[in-house]
Amino acid sequence: MGLPKLAPAQAAHDKLKALGILALNGMFDEMDALGVLRYAVSDVLPGDLAIVSSFGADSAVLLHMVAQVDPSMPVYFLETGKHFRGTLDYVETLKRQFGLVNVHAIHPNPDDVKRFDPEGNLWETDPDSCCHIRKTEPLEPITEQYGGWVTGRKRYQTTERGVLPHFELTSDDRIKVNPLAYFSDADVVAYRQAHNLPEHPLYAKGYKSIGCAPCTSIVAEGEDPRAGRWRGLNKKECGIHYDFSGAIANPMKAANRHTLWKDGAFIADPFKEWEEGADASEARYVHVPLPVFLANRAAFLANPHPLGLLIVPGDKIEEAEADLSRFASVAIKFPSFSDGRGYSTARLLVERFKYAGEIRAVGDVLQDQIPHMRRCGFNALVVTHEPTREALIENRLPEMTLFYQPVGLTEIPLGTRPFLRRVS
Ligand code: SF4
């Protein structure tokens, strides 16, 4: 092949990158799915390409091609915890039959599930958030390890996918390869028959597009195969394919765009800011300002969605003491570097109210404050200040060994003078 090898590192200039993708997309016959995949594996991103498969109704076709090209290609399966038993069996069937030796199940973070979906019914009230914690979040650290990934998406599936090319450049400089972009439903069926591929156990029962069990239903004869996904909701994608240059498909979100620092990394933030006038009974994943909560307490308590509470200087957290367990997160605002009232609020939450949820600092969060924040009980930070972001990523926070005001129960060497108090 005449094209040079494309790798994200080479593609420094947007225009050149776009031209490279255009050239790639002109190289293959529309139906040459195997050729697209072979070239992607051997020339475009050798050793740097993975596939995310749903092991759904159509998955056997692409996985069969993967097995022909490179059976050791990493295959990731989003084990959301909500799949049909038949899908889990199908994973094993295809692994065995195709000789795929590098299949991995990705599970949601158990803490996120416990926190945001303790009853396991978030799909019912807030499917976007459910997909976020069960698919998008667990997938991000995986996809970030690769220069690109292969998808089984096809043009005919949805209007949004109607212009899907073989190769896409994502907004974080990775390449998505869509070998089946031009396949129709009939092409898929024909390929399956030609190669005698095993059928998903639910396909014959009328499930033509198969995802998680609660969000998948049987489709009628002649109905769009994807009509059975999130039926009745204005939702067509799970979130892992959104946001591609505002047009086609979405790539992985770049980690450096996240502002929520938690458990040693910047991660996607499920929470948004409260919008004035929003409906208390419908709100979800927002930090509700304390006065708004107090004024609409009954509605917020009856609201089934995950919520947070926003505390700004001057608010009295005590006023919400009885309801703190309602909130998955408490955001404490630091309007300026010099305003220390937020530290006291965090200490009240931890030491007096035994609040065990997320306590996040928002606002003017700077490097030098972070050790103090941690001592006072903050376990999450929203950081937009670039030098502070870099310091966190590079683990360059100022060390604090002496303190004047002890916090908590373990840090108080009673009877010592302030200048002798040390962080143990
Ligand atoms: S498809 Fe349904 S159950 Fe699966 S993660 Fe999305 S909302 Fe949740």
Image (cartoon, grey):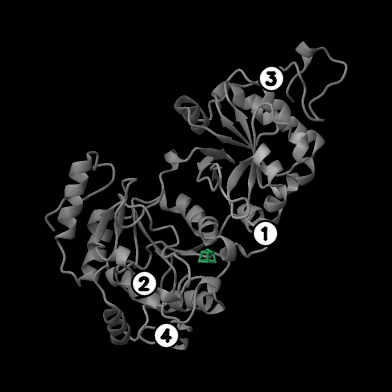
In this rendered view, identify the residue nearer to me: 77 or 301: 301
Look at 23% across and 41% down and name the residue there.
14
How far separated are the C-alphas under marks 4 and 3? 68 Å
**Tally of marks:** 4
Q: Nearer the viewer, mark 1 or mark 3?
A: 1
- Mark 2 lies on residue: 63
Give left or right: position of 417 versus 10. right
Give left or right: position of 328 versus 388. right
How far separated are the C-alphas under marks 1 and 3? 39 Å
Q: Is residue 350 visible?
A: no
**Mark 1 belongs to which amino acid?**
Pro
Q: Is residue 59 visible?
A: yes
Q: What label does residue 118 carry, if any?
A: 1
Residue at the right extreme, as displayed: 415
- Mark 3 lies on residue: 401
Q: Position of residue 281 (x, y in %)?
A: 63, 54
Q: Which SS class for mark 1?
A: loop
Q: Which SS class for mark 3?
A: loop
Question: Disc 1, ligand 1: is the CB inside 8 Å?
Answer: no
Q: Nearer the viewer, mark 1 or mark 4?
A: 4
- Mark 4 lies on residue: 220
Q: Quadrant of the N terminus?
A: bottom left
